[in-house]
Image (cartoon, grey):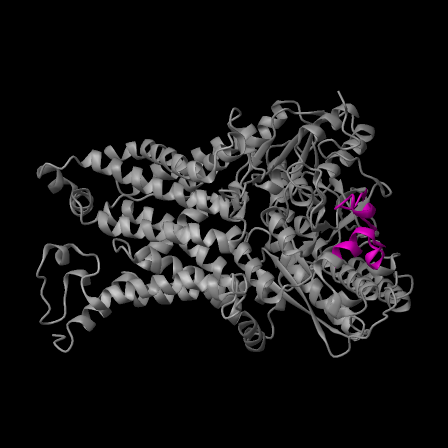
């Protein structure tokens, strides 16, 4: 990890320096600079208070979605990347958070600010429940157990009669806007300043977690659970903690997703979404704190920005190259085609994820010119 | 084979002759342009699933848009402006719908947008209102058009009746045409699949004499075995299976019914999408005892004119263009027609709005909304648009039809009329047709609190 590596001649002289998240001035500049730029983006759009039109308003929505999914994938990273426990039901846990917060807001009149932590905690407990099989099974068998969570949660939301009056089954649910002291967070601009700080906090917590006793226990369980148990680590308890934390993250992401779009539907939390979240983590780099950010940003920028931009050109090109193909079929194939090709190429070139490449680049920079 | 060839040639010649002679005559004309838009390009932006479960329906939609836009551009465009289309594929992923909407609404801000699915209209309902963007859509969920309270018309205007009203229409027909009708509802486990199974629809059906099985059955669009769901409905007494799905969905229900040996004991029925060409073609992997595909005989809503109605000038024109562009049978479906209808309605909405607002540069989403609310128009003569001065967001005329297959003697295939077998490359298939069983009638209003919802 590059965090442990300092440029030649740079030494820690205090405990504060030793435990700092960003240990060099360069790291600090990069982290704080990036955060500052992101926080300034909405102010540079036409939706901002200054009416500047330097950046398209569209980017606020793009960043909001990336931030929400980053929180969800960060949860999956704790479970899979740090603790080595696979989950195919992460979208279902997001649904638990989303629906429970929406019900708390709609039916019980709770504000977003109360609904958010309560829904996150509730999701954590549901995750804990589905983590129980991890005591006895692991690997593919655990994947199957968590897959069951995906379907069970979905069934409860759609079909469980005592719940249906609140969840409206498979029908959509309108979610109220968050408010604070009479101010409504109705726009993407306003939601940005709820979502992005929460995403930053979630990232910092995850980065710190790996350095704590709990985080190190997670990693030992991932690397060799038998050895961890022999060292006195309560493997089952730590696995459950990982499920709980992971689900809390998923719950927070679900709540934010519901309140961001003000509309909720179970169709947004299907199995394919769970697999998509897993794919984002693998692309970004499982086991790296920055992996979720890279993975989510890569997939979202590809799908939301790059593919729509190159689609007209690709459509024309393919129609020229494949004159026998039906133009309508070409138009419909472009998105999955480009997305699939990008993923395949990427996974061949960087199978350990973008975060791994990022670490290599950072190390190479820090130890220059002594790269050997 | 000679007979088949003869029938096809006669049909083709008849179609081309009728088409060539009167393709444009009798089609409702657009309002006269008061402002010239020559030199401009007006793009129809649409957001929908092109590569997910809706693909069998939506790919022909693009072809319909392409052909309609091409034809209208050759015939003067939109008051001289060139029409273009910009499709945005969501793959049925809500986050992609949101991403496309964000991009289109912020960077292009079109006054009129086209959506395809109930799920998308529900997701974007509040955002469309905030951004003041009007929408044309061919889906009819209460929540998407009228909101959760079913009483707040939004910014989306449907080109078909509400799904719940379609079920009511079907019950009217079933009460008169099926002995002791007991309806079992089966649909995709999605917002669209659940859209018509409401307490109001159930109460209405029961009030007209159609018993409804209490528990509906649902299945995933990716499901391959739904025999348990069908068995449950049949065990509960259903002799009608009303299907709320499209493309592969109704074909799966039909195939399962045949495979379970239930084809003589249940009537297959469904929403307007269940009678589509795509269903008729997909249903040809399983054949019933009568030697016809399992999907033969699906009864359901046909809320606009169909390909077989060659006496309709709009259908004549569409057939002529589809022939000229050598569109295969897989493309000649409900969505191809929708593409044409939507483009025609889009043009009319723009012209009326520009005329009222004093030019194309003054067109806004709110102005288009005002136009649509008061518009009385029949896109290519295929269906009637009348949103009742803003009180409605769906069309209210429907009729019942049946999906069958073309016979050698011209009508639907049957015991005395063997089906026409068409060959395309190394594939052979039967030609699906839709035969209307009733005339257009007003659908019951079955929204919660709707005028036709039984009070007790």
B86 w.r.t. B235: above or below? below
Q: How many marks?
A: 0
- Name the quadrant of the N terminus of chain A: bottom left
Q: Compared with residue B185, is residue B38 higher up or lower down, i.e. above or below?
A: below
* Residue B441 at x, y percent in the picture: 85, 40
Name which quarter of the figure residue A5 lies in.
Answer: bottom left
Q: Residue furthest front?
A: A181
* Residue interval drawn in magenta: B368-397
Q: Nearer the viewer, residue A119 or A227?
A: A119
Asked if residue A185 shows in the view, the reply is yes
Residue A1 seen in this snapshot: no
In the orientation shown, which residue stands out farthest toward the top? Answer: B456
Percent position of residue A213, x then y: 16, 43
Image point (9%, 65%), residue name: A11
Q: Is residue B375 magenta?
A: yes
Residue closer to the observer: B177 or A60: A60
Q: Which of the 4 quarters of the picture holds residue B297? A: top right
* Quadrant of the image containing the C terminus of chain A: bottom left
Residue in the picture at 61% in, 58% down: B47
Residue B419: say if magenta: no
Q: Quadrant of residue B77?
A: bottom right
Using the image as rendered, state which of residue A347 and residue A126 is in the foreground. A126
- Tell me where residue B427 appears, x and y as whole percent: 63, 59
Whole-percent x and y of residue A168? 57, 33
Q: Is residue B137 left or right of residue B217?
A: right
């Amino acid at each position: 990890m590059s965090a442990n590596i300092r440029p030649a001649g740079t030494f820690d002289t205090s405990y504060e320096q030793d435990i700092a998240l960003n240990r060099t001035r360069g790291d600090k500049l990069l982290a704080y600079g990036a955060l500052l730029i992101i926080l300034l983006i909405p102010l540079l759009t036409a939706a901002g208070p200054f009416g500047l039109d330097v950046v398209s308003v569209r980017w606020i929505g793009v960043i909001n979605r990336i931030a929400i999914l980053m929180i969800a994938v960060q949860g999956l990273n704790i479970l899979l990347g740090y603790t080595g426990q696979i989950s195919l039901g992460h979208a279902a846990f997001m649904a638990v958070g989303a629906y429970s917060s929406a019900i708390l807001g709609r039916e019980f009149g709770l504000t977003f600010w109360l609904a958010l932590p309560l829904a996150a905690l509730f999701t954590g407990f549901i995750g804990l429940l589905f983590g129980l099989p991890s005591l006895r099974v692991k690997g593919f068998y655990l994947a199957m157990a968590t897959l069951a969570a995906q379907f069970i949660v979905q069934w409860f939301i759609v079909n469980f009669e005592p719940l249906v009056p609140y969840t409206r089954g498979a029908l959509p649910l309108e979610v109220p806007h968050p408010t604070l002291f009479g101010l409504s967070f109705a726009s993407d601009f306003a939601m940005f300043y709820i979502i992005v700080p929460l995403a930053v906090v979630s990232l910092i917590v995850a980065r710190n977690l790996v350095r704590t006793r709990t985080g190190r226990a997670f990693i030992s369980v991932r690397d060799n659970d038998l050895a961890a148990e022999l060292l006195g680590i309560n493997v089952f308890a730590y696995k459950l903690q990982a499920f709980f934390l992971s689900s809390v993250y998923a719950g927070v992401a679900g709540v934010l997703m519901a309140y961001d779009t003000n509309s909720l539907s179970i169709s947004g939390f299907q199995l394919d979404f769970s697999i998509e979240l897993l794919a984002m983590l693998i692309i970004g780099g499982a086991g790296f704190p920055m992996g979720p950010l890279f993975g989510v940003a890569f997939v979202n920028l590809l799908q939301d920005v790059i593919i729509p931009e190159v689609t007209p050109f690709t459509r024309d090109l393919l129609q020229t190259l494949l004159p026998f193909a039906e133009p309508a079929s070409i138009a419909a194939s472009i998105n999955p085609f480009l997305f699939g090709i990008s993923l395949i190429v990427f996974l061949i070139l960087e199978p350990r994820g973008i975060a791994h490449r990022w670490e290599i680049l950072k190390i190479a920079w820090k130890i220059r010119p002594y790269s050997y | 084979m000679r007979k088949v060839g003869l029938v096809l040639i006669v049909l083709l010649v008849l179609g081309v002759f009728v088409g060539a002679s009167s393709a444009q005559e009798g089609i409702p004309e657009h309002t006269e342009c008061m402002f010239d838009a020559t030199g401009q390009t007006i793009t129809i932006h649409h957001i929908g699933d092109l590569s997910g479960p809706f693909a069998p329906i939506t790919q022909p939609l693009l072809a319909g848009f392409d052909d309609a836009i091409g034809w209208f551009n050759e015939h003067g465009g939109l008051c001289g402006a060139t029409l273009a289309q910009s499709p945005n594929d969501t793959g049925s992923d809500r986050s992609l719908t949101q991403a496309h909407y964000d991009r289109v609404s912020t960077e292009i801000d079109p006054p009129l947008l086209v959506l395809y699915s109930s799920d998308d209209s529900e997701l974007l309902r509040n955002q469309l209102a905030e951004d003041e963007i009007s929408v044309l859509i061919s889906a009819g969920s209460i929540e998407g058009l009228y909101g959760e309270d079913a009483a707040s018309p939004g910014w989306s205007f449907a080109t078909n009746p509400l799904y719940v009203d379609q079920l009511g229409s079907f019950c009217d027909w079933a009460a008169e045409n099926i002995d002791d009708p007991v309806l079992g509802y089966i649909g995709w486990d999605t917002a669209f699949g659940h859209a018509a199974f409401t307490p109001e629809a159930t109460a209405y059906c029961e009030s007209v004499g159609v018993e409804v099985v209490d528990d509906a059955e649902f299945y995933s669009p990716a499901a391959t075995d739904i025999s348990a769901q069908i068995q449950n409905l049949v065990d509960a007494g259903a002799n009608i299976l009303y299907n709320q799905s499209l493309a592969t969905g109704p074909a799966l229900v039909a195939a399962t019914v045949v495979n379970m040996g239930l084809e003589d004991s249940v009537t297959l029925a469904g929403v307007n999408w269940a009678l589509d060409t795509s269903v008729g073609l997909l249903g040809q992997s399983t054949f019933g005892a009568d030697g016809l595909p399992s999907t033969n005989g699906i009864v359901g809503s046909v809320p606009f004119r169909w390909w077989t109605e060659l006496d309709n000038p709009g259908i004549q024109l569409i057939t002529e263009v589809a022939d000229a562009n050598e569109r295969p049978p897989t493309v000649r479906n409900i969505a191809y027609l929708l593409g044409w209808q939507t483009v025609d309605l889009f043009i009319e909405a723009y012209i009326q709005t520009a005329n009222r607002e004093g030019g194309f540069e003054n067109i806004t989403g709110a102005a288009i909304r005002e136009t649509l609310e008061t518009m009385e128009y029949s896109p290519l003569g295929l269906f009637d648009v009348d949103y009742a001065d803003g009180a409605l967001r769906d069309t209210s005329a429907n009729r019942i039809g049946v999906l069958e297959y073309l016979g050698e003697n011209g009508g639907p295939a049957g015991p005395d009329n063997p089906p026409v077998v068409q060959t395309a490359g190394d594939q052979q298939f039967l030609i699906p047709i839709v035969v209307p069983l009733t005339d257009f009638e007003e659908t019951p209003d079955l929204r919660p609190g709707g005028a036709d919802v039984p009070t007790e």
